[in-house]
Amino acid sequence: MIITRQEENYFKIQSGDAALLIDPTSQRSFKGAAVAINTVRPSYIEFDGTGDCFWIDHQGEYEIQGIHVHGWNAGHEDGTEKTIYRIEFDDIIISVLGHITQEPSKDFFEYLEGTDVLIVPAGGKPWISQATLYKFIRQIEPSVIIPSLFKDLKPFLKECNVPGATKEEKFVFKKKDLTPGAMEIKYLEEKK
């Protein structure tokens, strides 16, 4: 599996010929993608329905080309609906907190149990505070944490008691490479 961070909270996750997009910002990126997931509604772009990409922008359960997606409502703010997703793709569980601004309810501990890779908004205001976020992450105990939505990662790393992190172009791994509960931080650079 390969995870790349295109920008902000826009990620591409690929395994073999199947690709999944999270919060895409351009319809050009749909080429070759099986699924596009949006953590906010209305999304950054309008989907015109063309192509083979399956568009998800709200809670529910979906299965597309062996990719299982489950989304739960994470609240509404200023006319924006927010969704937290759990994705099962190639025997790996990836959870995406998206654009949350407050700690999710306790129900989410059960929903996100067994998460291998957790993508989180690590920038603090206007998103969830780093302290509250890390408290939530510790209860999930993913193998890997991938920060998103940040200008400066240092406050989040400090909250996590991690002295520093090296930028990586992409995260390439298999299920056997992951250590349950390790909470290793992968700092992915933006492709833009």
Image (cartoon, grey):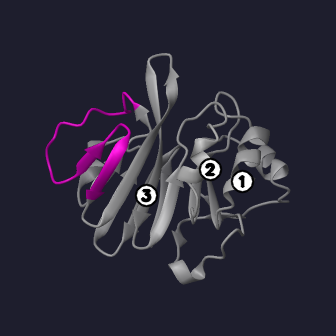
Q: Position of residue 175 (x, y in %)?
A: 52, 78
Residue 63 sits in which quadrant? bottom left
Crowd band around label 2 with a 10 angstrom C-alpha radius: few (<14), some (14–19), many (20+): some
Comparing 185 with 112, the one in front is: 112
Q: Which residue is mark 2?
A: 109
Image spot of residue 116 (x, y percent)? 57, 66
Whether the magenta-drawn stretch holds residue 45 is answered as: yes
For mark 3, what is the residue?
Answer: 87
The kind of secondary structure the magenta stretch mainly shows is loop
> In this picture, is 80 found above or below 72?
above
Secondary structure type for disc 3: strand
Res. 139 mark: 1
Secondary structure of residue under mark 1: helix
Q: In the shown orientation, is residue 76 left or right of residue 51?
A: right
Q: Could you tell me which secondary element the residue under label 2 belongs to?
A: helix
- Identify the residue at image location x=23%, y=56%: 31
